[in-house]
Image (cartoon, rainbow, N blue to C red):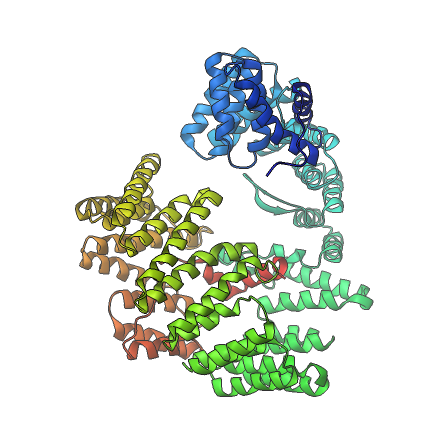
Amino acid sequence: MENKNYKNYTIEEIKCLINKGINNEEIKEEDEICYEEAEKIIKKQLKNDSNNKELLFLLGLVQYGIYSSSGDEEKSIETFKKLLRLDYEKDKVLYYLAVLYYYNKPNSKILIKKNIKLLESAIELNDKDSEYWYLLGRMYFYHIKDYDKSIFCYTKAAKINYTEIMYNEKKYYHYELGKINLYVGSSIDAAENLKEAINSFDYGYNLSDAWYYLGLSYEKNNQYDEAVKSYENALYINADSRLDDYFYGSLYTVKSLYDLYKKLGKNYEAVYALENSIEKDAYIPFYFIPFPNRKEEYKNFKGSEIYNDIVKAYTNVIKNNSYNAEGYIHQLSYFYELYKEYDKAIELYNKISKESYENIAGIYEKTKNYDKAIDIYKMLINMYPDNSACFFNYIASVYRKTKNYEKSINYYKKALEADSKNTDYYINIAETYEKINNYEEAVNYYNKAIELYNGPCRYYKKLAEAYKNIGKYEKAIEAYKEYLKIVNNGHEVSYLYTVCFKLNTLKNIAHLYDKLNDIENRNLYYEKAIERCGELIKEYKYYKKMYLEEMADIYMRIGCKEEAFEIYHDLIKKYDKEILKNKKDYELLEKQGELYGKIDNKEKAFEIYSKAIGLCLKKIERFKNTKISYTDEEYEDKISFCMEDLSYLALFYQKVSRYEEANLAYEELIKIYEEKVTDSEDSIFYLESIAEIYIKLNNSDNALKTYKRILEIDKYNDAEDKIRYIQSGNKIRTAHIFELSHRIYMQHGQTEMVSKKFCN
């Protein structure tokens, strides 16, 4: 379709646009259109003279403007490569190639060395362009870690402060130089450069960060009054001011200000700094809480001076803001919850509204005091009869947690009697019927929800799965086809969700046609799935290999072995190249080994898995030879990496039929998990992992004993279902790889804490 905004731009107009990029002027919508049309116009003119250097250079700049931030740098790279051969504007061409290679693969060690050579060659030709020095300094800093060279390059960039490069970083020269000055201990130089940076920044996060770094510099120089002013300026711009960088990790300005006041013995000012931050963003003190992997710090935080100061600050804010204290009470209550001071949390919640009673009930649920939670919800029904449907739903949910499915269904039905238009209640009933394997009733309630919704909706997927469970494959296919229509309904699901579901739904439909022995329709939907893989490959280049393998697997299902093998062979070659660059990455070997298995080359697969075993053994040996203390704050991370290596080792041993050695690796994993088991709920994660490893070892007796240990700690745990599955001879899905997963943080409330801040 022809662009209605099309304009036949002149070369001079295109040059003006390039100058906007060089001067870092704001790019407007019409400028973006100009870039797109300019590429077509220049290419058209180049047809008459394909080696016109000036036009080619202009084309390279236009392509750089279009593609440098879109992840599609290849067009621009090819144009600049041609210009390099034609020896035109060589210093600029060398720079643009370096920066394009860098954005394309910023972490490639080979490319970093190549980029440094390109930049050094550009500087030999022209040492008066500050951007060449700046990018070279960045590479020495972040990748080579040669800080002296980095400072030299950044200093040159700041002094020259002139460039003819598009999208340059001129305003960051003093900022980056100030940061590295600070890191290497030159805090006086850091302060001077950061003051220069502050003068060049607009109001916003960059300015806030610059003030924060300046405050850190002043504090290093013992200029405490100036440090306090700088921290306060950073917080004035951004109450959530923080650093998350190469040297400092995560630092929060309010924490630095608090710590400085404490160092100076100004306890009142320290608490006041917390109060001030709470009034701007009530959640900020939660950032001070250490994560559980820092064992000693996490353990000692409760009752510490800062813990008590946070409580004091919240309390003062609540007193001083009685007219809108509710939000602060919520946050302090939640703070108490995290550290299991439930009585204090309930005492606070009792001061406020209906919502607080819900929170109290929520605390009772967390502590598995389900009877008290139900009592509060019943009390709320009497207090707020207009909201009874909501509270009936909560009661039903509690009964479902306790696996009292009959009462759960009864209360969900009461919720429906109070509010028959709420589709969620129908879905809740359907899902509860599925828990007791009553799929006929589940189908009934899914259909009622869909009828109420009256349009394409996500519930069709659940309906399809319920039909599948009772063997009504034609009905399941119909439901899946309705579910496909959801892709055109942007209000129903997120864009990301629609990307994920379509391929799987097409495959599910094909699989059901296969069960019906309808080969024609089976192949039709597998072909649609192949077509979808092609679309995803174009749209998500990063996942190209994954979707290619998916495509090949589908070809195998419909008997197109030749097409499948062609893709598998191509993928093997791609992994060959990746393995050459990442020789110690056994996960790449795992993927390549699987591909050799798919083309029936067992000998080669055996060879690949044997290599992977060698890599795992070396990594495990290296870990065993490393002196590591249980009190080391990185202990959990290091142990987790070792467990991952052991887990992969067991997997690879199984692949080459060395089952005794695989079992030894799994037994080693069990020992590591067992060391962490106590009588507390925190141990459930470890026990679940132990049980799954026993299942991998085909040791169902010990798996059952382990699940029973879980029930001794938590009688409502899903371990009861696992026991029933094992005793009935069903298989339980187990983890692919075992480690000290981030899931353990759920036990400590950290994941929930983050989701409350960013997901609500």
Q: How many marks?
A: 0
Q: Is residue 612 left or right of residue 529?
A: left
Return the residue nearer the eye: 25 or 499: 499
Residue 410: x and y in percent read 54, 88
Image quarter of the N terminus? top right
Residue at 52%, 37% (x, y): give it.
Answer: 71
Residue 710: x and y in percent read 39, 75
Q: Quadrant of residue 694?
A: bottom left
* Vertical relation: 283 (above or below) 261: below
Q: Is residue 698 left or right of residue 423?
A: left
Residue 189: x and y in percent read 65, 27
Q: Quadrant of residue 234?
A: top right
* Vertical relation: 704 (above or below) 564: below
Q: Is residue 441 left or right of residue 758?
A: left
* Vertical relation: 207 (above or below) 753: above
Residue at 44%, 54% (x, y): give it.
Answer: 631
Image quarter of the C terminus? bottom right
Q: Is residue 246 left or right of residue 510?
A: right
Evaluate whether residue 441 shows in this view: yes
Return the residue nearer the eye: 295 or 455: 455
Return the residue nearer the eye: 221 or 401: 401
Evaluate whether residue 620 shows in this view: no
Residue at 63%, 28% (x, y): give it.
Answer: 167
Q: Quadrant of residue 615?
A: top left
Residue 70: x and y in percent read 55, 37
* Vertical relation: 400 (above or below) 53: below
